[in-house]
Image (tube, rainbow, N blue to C red):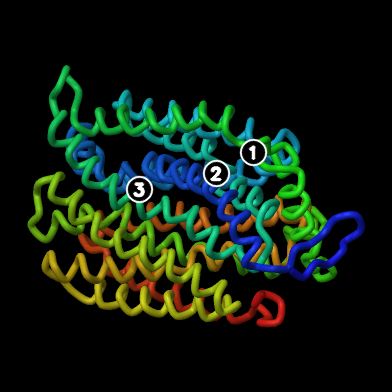
Amino acid sequence: MANVYQGSAVLDTSSTDNSDLYRKVTIRLITFFCLCYFAAYLDRINIGLAKLQMLDALKFSDTVYGLGAGLFFAGYILFEVPSNLILQRVGARLWIARIMITWGLLSGATLFVTTPMQFYIVRFLLGVAEAGFLPGVLLYLTQWYPDARRARIVALFMVGLPLSSMIGSPISGWIMAFFNGAHGLGGWQWLFLLEALPSIALGIAILAWLPNNIESARWLSAVEKKTLRANLDAEPSGNKSHSLSGAFVDFKVWALGLIDLCVLLGLYATSFWLPSILRDTGVADPYHIGWLMAIPNALAVLSTLYCGASSDRMRERRWHIVVPFLVAAVALVIAGSGHHGTVATVILFSLINAGAAAAMPVVWSLPSTFLKGPAAAAGIAFACSIANLGGFGSTYFIGWLRDTFHSQSAGLFGFAACMIVGCALALTYSAKLVNR
């Protein structure tokens, strides 16, 4: 076994021996975080299926829906960086638990909405509550895993996102169909109530389950803690920014946010608008729409896991973003080029979703290659804010387009153009910097 001495710590450079240790950490942490992301994203995107009943029940237009769905991102953006800086100060356990419990309560409160203003307020507050979860977990993972393992680990965490739609969409459709009218509540109201409960329960569980750092993990031996810490200390840090203020002016951080925006555009095109597009093709039952929504997300699960593992195995980051984006861009152009039947629509949005999802773990393996410490906390959160600013604009823009032109083609073409821009931005990163 080859060992490298780092001061008093011993760095085990044998990937085989370390695999058992990292598997132990992954089973303990990533499985739990995947469940949390599943619940978080379900609370974020169930509005897409709720729309099928909610708009008629409340007499909301597509523009009202688009603005309300988008205001989530306004709250999210404003509190993303402060939330991540608070997490770094008070610890991941307390702060992530707070995030999950408050967003669960606010998501459930959506069932009481009766006016557009109430809808706007609860969606904005939901964004405030959830702000910091994704960048907080990503920051937390940089404190456990070295760069060479990062993409596959982020993939295992982020697979909770497509899983939430793959499993959650059929369940959501069933809730809306089965509970509609029960105890005087619409199916969409039951949807918000029942799907808020897992987030609250997981938030409480975090307080008992999550260690703040390697040293406070009671399920690791002293030797295991030293090995994990030594592997992190051995990472090259000479080219990493440590400055908090520098993170806001670093082109690499801005590029990261814009690339993640492209990911979100592909995912939200499916999550927020595919239910309505499927209904336009003649599928009327929310239960059937929920099952059809599972297909694009099943493909996204596979593409996320494959691309993350492939990127780590090949030690290549840039083209593992570019190729999936190109696939999504072509599918977006075809989807926007005319009216398609149900089968063709599902196939096209499966490619869009898979392409966007595949790039996610690779995109979020990049920050640790050029950011560290406070700069990492601020930079990751700021990049998420940039991306979600686009998410806010896209949801409102497509709603306005549907009301004005009775078509979403222009929005899909615009999303395709953004994917091409994302390819160009990915190639601006130095291969020498990020391919490790």
How packed is label 2: few (under 14 Cα within 10 Å), some, or many (20 or more)? some
The residue nearer to you, when weighing 46 against 162, is 162
- Residue at the spot of label 3: 164
Q: Is residue 125 left or right of residue 49?
A: right
Quadrant in which the C terminus appears: bottom right
Instruction: Report the Cα–Cα distance between label 2 and label 1.
Output: 9 Å
Identify the residue shown where x is 72% and y is 33%.
90
Amino acid type assigned to the residue bearing label 2 in the image: Arg
Q: Is residue 81 left or right of residue 112?
A: right
Report if residue 257 is visible in the image. Answer: no
Q: Nearer the viewer, mark 2 or mark 3?
A: 2
- Residue at the spot of label 2: 28
Report if residue 328 is visible in the image. Answer: yes
Amino acid type assigned to the residue bearing label 3 in the image: Ser
Instruction: Report the Cα–Cα distance between label 2 and label 3.
Output: 20 Å
Identify the residue shown where x is 19% and y is 67%.
345
Find residue 382 and report its horizontal and vertical position in percent: 64, 54
Amino acid type assigned to the residue bearing label 1 in the image: Trp
First-in-chain label (2 vs 1): 2
Secondary structure state at the residue bearing disc 2: helix
Find residue 43 and report its horizontal and vertical position in percent: 38, 39
Residue 321 lies, with reference to residue 232, above or below; the image says: below
Q: Nearer the viewer, mark 3 or mark 1?
A: 1
Quadrant in which the N terminus appears: bottom right
Secondary structure state at the residue bearing disc 3: helix
Check residue 219 in the rendering and tell me which mark sits there, or answer none. Answer: 1
The residue nearer to you, when weighing 123 against 234, is 234
